[in-house]
Amino acid sequence: MTDNELYLKSIQYRIRLLKYIKMAGAGHTGGSLSCVDILNVFYNRILNVTPQTLNDPGRDRYIQSKGHSVEALYVVLADRGFFPEKELETLCGYGSDYTGHPTRKVKGIEHNTGGLGHGLAFSVGVALASKLDHIAYRVFTLLGDGELAEGSNWESLMAAAHYQLDNLCVIVDRNSLQITGKTEDVCGLEPLAQKLAAFGGEVRMVDGHNITALTEMLGTLPFAEGKPSVVIARTIKGKGISFMENNPKWHHGVPDEKQYEQAQQELEARLAEIKS
Amino acid sequence: MNFTPGAELGKANLEVFAETLLTLARRNKNVLAVTSDSRGSGKLTPYAAAVPEQLIEVGIAEQNLVGVAAGLASTGKIVYAVSPASFLTARALEQIKNDVCYSDHPVKLIGISAGVSYGALGSTHHAIHDIAVLRAINNITIIVPADNLETTEAIKAAAQMSHPVYVRFGKRPMPHLHPLDASFKVGKSLQIREGEDIAFIATGETVYPALKAAEEMEQSGYSCRLISMHTIKPLDIEAVIRAAEECRAIVTAEEHRTAGGLGEACAAVLIGAKKQVPFKIAGIPDEYTMTGSQLEIFEHYGLTGPGLARTAINLLESKKRIDEYE
């Protein structure tokens, strides 16, 4: 697939995730919009996993530690054929497998997440098993930036460095917002790159909405032999919808009828723009 | 061959655990111990020397310990996460709840130096909340072995289990309570003595004091049943109901707070089955725990032979009607 085709997909993913959030009347809109381009590149270009290889011990694993952005993951997995997209019409509904955070009931999801600061420890365990068994798969973990206030992440990063897990790639969705406001106002994270490096990660920065740049960077994994690779992906919370961008109100805001119309119009316009 | 329960002192359950794990690890290289600077307290130093590649150390980081264990287990490894019960089940409770139980990765959580094993080190090191919190979490088996046989069998059974399990025990040598050919089954209690006046339903390191209580009472003419309820979840409901039907009163005993543990689990069964029987939970009450060694704390709270006998006789001889609130 060309970059252009992936850019088109990114817009389609946004259209769909908003559709299902609107339908469910619930969802984590802002964070799904900030990480969906990363997931696009992961599942369409980087990860060696398909619905057919889900039980293959050598498959690449993706662990979404920022579980709340599950709507982005659902639409990407559906697009990749892990389950029929129609099932997302039950999102957050009574008896649905499609809960508001990832669970293994959904095909393609490796681990139940939602409580923050959990995904990295699990990923370290999975990556460690690959080293012990000499099976060369990779583990990709998406962390939120607000999530980094959870101390458990730092325990896990220390362990990843200690065990020289260069088959682990940690990517931080650095949208700089959390539910209360700016991460730097809530409990400052900066200098983040230095902190992650000090804990043993080989750190790179990238524009998390630039498909080409993400692809190029993730194509060079591992960044350093014997070290976990860490990507700080600079993103915009609410990316792609003018009135949602950089507004913490949209952390789990659900658009009303009018807002939904406007959002879809903006996305359709962008779609036409890319197509032309 | 005659076997007398309690007559012969065995090893610490902790030691037996470590030996059993080493045997399992030697047989299967997928067996792993994960420790949080706890290999020494887990008696795993010989294990570490014998199968170094099967020990994963994460440092003093229990949250990471449990998360890493879940990740390893998800790939098919047979993972024993070993840490003092107090830290394992409190510090890492959310990891147990989410990464192990909810996600259903079959980690074997091993709570060492459980209960008040650490005695005078104080409440930071006591695990007398663990059964209560884990009972409230879906998808985990809870085993509290009483003697060496129960410990060995529990550790072996855990290896075969495809869902999460928690096993907790102490570090003091324990008398043998069962003959070597006793059949241990997860979820099925072991009856040590038959009797029909009182039924002691005890777990872990309080089974031996309950045995002493039964022996003492027997001398005064009471007939005492003793059940080792090694599995607290799923509970052996049948044995609890049978005790209520066949005995005049029940005393439960546990090295745990009286809230939320074995006693309350039994009480719920009895009420649900409409079995009215004089009933008392022996354990550590809701108060600032007394300072002392494990045995001194047992003594203080009546978790000894004489203490449990006193509790049982008071219950049997009480003139109070069963529906009188104490």
Image: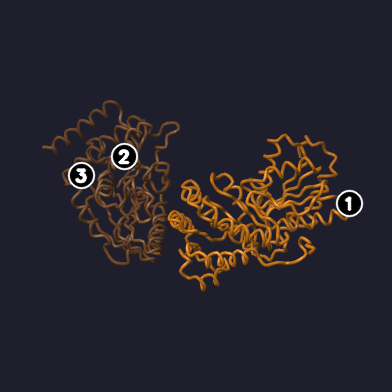
Chain colours: A brown, B orange
Determine the chain carrying the residue at label 1. Answer: B
What residue is disc 3 on? A6
**Label drawn at residue A78:** 2
Q: Is residue B241 above or below residue B55?
A: above
- Helix, strand, or loop for circle 2? helix
Most extreme residue toward the left, as rendered? A276
Chain of the residue under the numbered disc 3 shown in the image: A
Pointer 1 residue:
B221
Q: B280 or A38, which lies in front?
A: A38
| Mark 1 and mark 3 residues within 8 Å of each other at the beta carbon | no
**Residue at position x 63%, y 51% from top?**
B186
Secondary structure of residue under mark 3: helix
Type of amino acid at the residue the image marks with label 2: Ala
Q: For the C terminus of chain B, give its image quadrant.
A: top right
10 Å neighbourhood of mark 2: few (<14), some, or many (≥20)?
Answer: some
Image quadrant where residue A125 sits:
bottom left
